[in-house]
Amino acid sequence: MKKYLIVLLCLGLCGCATVLYKEGVSPEQFKKDAYECRYQALSSSGDNIFLMRMMADECMEARGYRKQ
């Protein structure tokens, strides 16, 4: 249960702090990419929220998204 609360907190913070943009991407595709990157980051980072955030951002950047 604690792990899920940490994940929800992290996802909330990730959504507020960084705006990612990729021209020509639909909202549905963005949601799919973000979900996949966050899932992959969560699977690899354990309980380290900061590592999860960094890995999710790197995944999105690898898919062509840029921070604004």
Image: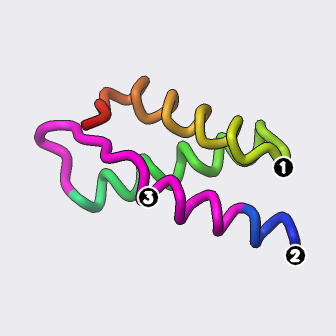
> From this viewpoint, which residue is outermost toward the top?
62
Label 2 element class: loop
What label does residue 47 carry, if any?
1
State the CA–CA distance, disc 2 to disc 3. Answer: 21 Å
* Percent x, y of residue 11: 57, 60
Q: Which residue is mark 3?
A: 15
The quadrant the N terminus occupies is bottom right
Give the mark nearer the N terminus: 1 vs 3.
3
Q: In front: mark 2 or mark 3?
A: 3
Give the mark nearer the N terminus: 2 vs 3.
2
> From this viewpoint, which residue is outermost toward the front?
17
The quadrant the C terminus occupies is top left
Residues drawn in magenta: 7-26
Please give the name of the residue rendered at 64% of the width and 66% of the height, measured from the top-left corner: 9
- For the residue carrying disc 2, how many other residues have a C-alpha within 10 Å: few (<14), some (14-19), or many (20+)? few
Quick one: 50 or 37, which is closer to the camera? 50
- For the residue carrying disc 1, how many other residues have a C-alpha within 10 Å: few (<14), some (14-19), or many (20+)? some
- For the residue carrying disc 3, how many other residues have a C-alpha within 10 Å: few (<14), some (14-19), or many (20+)? few
* Percent x, y of residue 41: 66, 41
Q: Which residue is mark 2?
A: 1
